[in-house]
Amino acid sequence: MASVPGREVVFARGEGVWLYDEQDRRYLDATASLWYCNVGYGRAELADAAAAQLHVLHAYSTFDVYANRPALELAERLAAIAPIEDAVVFLGSGGSDAVDTAGKLVRRYWQLRGRPERTIFVARAESYHGMHVFGTSLAGIAPNAAGWGTLVPDVRHVPLDDPAALGELLEREGERIAAFVGEPIVGAGGVIPPPDGYWAEVQRLCRAHDVLLIADEVVTGFGRTGPWFACERYGIEPDIVTGAKGVTSGYLPLGVVLCGPRVRELLWARDAGPFRHGYTYSGHAAACAVALANLDLIEREGLRERVRALEPVLAATVAGLADVPLVGATRCAGLLAGVELDAGARAAVPGLAERAVVRLRERGVLTRALVGHSLQLSPPFTISAEELAQIGEAIAAVLGELHAELEAEGVMSAR
Ligand code: PLP
């Protein structure tokens, strides 16, 4: 908190993949802000959709019998594209509250099933599920869960990408396990796609032990990997999907929870009683109108096809960095990539990734350090191949420069 004053970068406007600060310096946004500005900046039709709805009815509660047309239409639209048959939809204001909602749906589900002892959530090491209390409790990025005192009890973590460890946990404690939650591709933990067969095995284990499966698609949803949801990419058939970010490209805040038949049959049953949960802005009319316009835009401009076409370009861009000094590994899936810095270099130079991010910004490229080891690349879907190449060149130049300086300082040995 104390390190920011005096160093603020104040953005004034955006256009396409470019941001402009108050001094009119321009920056190429390699991360789509926090993974959300998927259709790019300055989309007048999304502003117009919001304004039109704000003029007639900005919002009204969706508790009890109340609804509004954009919320109803959005729920229908989401059910139609969900990676779940006959999905029902719960609307909120962001990814963290979607995760909280999913957590409470799961706990309620097992109460209604007459199995209240099934309270344990299983999450993965390196995972990120937002900043509310459920998400903080589920966090596999250890520092995010530390320093708060008691969080939601009954969370277990399994190593990333290790179905055998999950299998052992289920053998041991399966009768008490409520749900497994995972990001199809780990995002904030460093952009880590799953190994082949990982999700098929997780799904098999969850089914065998009657455990609910939650796919947290807050980053991967709404076309980020090509299909509407990464569940399709990996053949995941989840019971619950959480989403946010790309549903509106961030033009207004919105979060969604999609529920499949298992959850729906109990919680939406006549004798289920009330689900005592909901947010002031659940089904916010203007946010829903923007989401509808954003989904229209993605379809009309063929942006999911564009993601598919650009994936090999981004993959080649980061693969081309493999021999650049200070690069340890690179990963890519859809329009998501991570450039991991060499472990030895990071050990020798604390804060190396953060330094690279500052240098890149000075060169006019915005990226982010993930968990201190990887640079995040998750550009708007509208980025061009030339702009992707520009990002790659900037990273190569900055890391080359940093390496030469560290060598001159005697911190690093020659490569
Ligand atoms: N889940 C995942 C996988 C995320 O990456 C995020 C945010 O980055 C969240 C949940 C939380 O979303 P929000 O920041 O909108 O609350």
Image (spheres, rainbow, N blue to C red):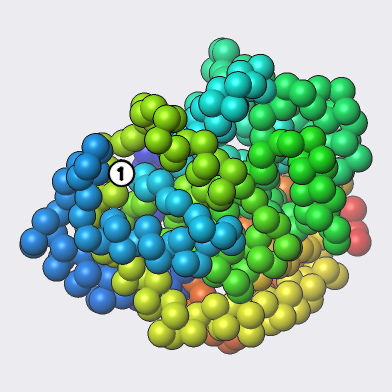
Does any portion of residue 380 appear in the rendered image? yes
Query: In the shown orientation, is residue 214 left or right of residue 346?
Result: left
Residue drawn 81% across the image and 55% down it: 200
Residue at figure coordinates x 66%, y 29% from the top left: 178
Label total for image: 1
Expressed as whole percent of the image width and height from the top left, the position of residue 133 reads 50, 26
Whether 274 is drawn above or below 230: the answer is: above
x and y percent of residue 91 in the render?
Answer: 37, 48
Looking at the image, which residue is at 72% across and 48% down?
A: 373
Most distant residue in the left direction: 55
Residue 187, x across and y down, in percent:
64, 52
Which one is in front, 98 or 377? 98
Residue 155 position within the rendered picture, expressed as x and y whole percent measured from the top left: 67, 24
Q: Nearer the viewer, residue 403 or 113?
A: 113
Q: Is residue 407 left or right of residue 35?
A: right
Going 58% across and 58% down the picture, which residue do you hit?
A: 84
The quadrant in which the N terminus is found is top left
Position of residue 101 relative to residue 74, above or below, is above
- Please identify the quarter of the rendering in which residue 233 is found: bottom right
Q: Which residue is mark 1?
A: 282
At mark 1, the secondary structure is loop
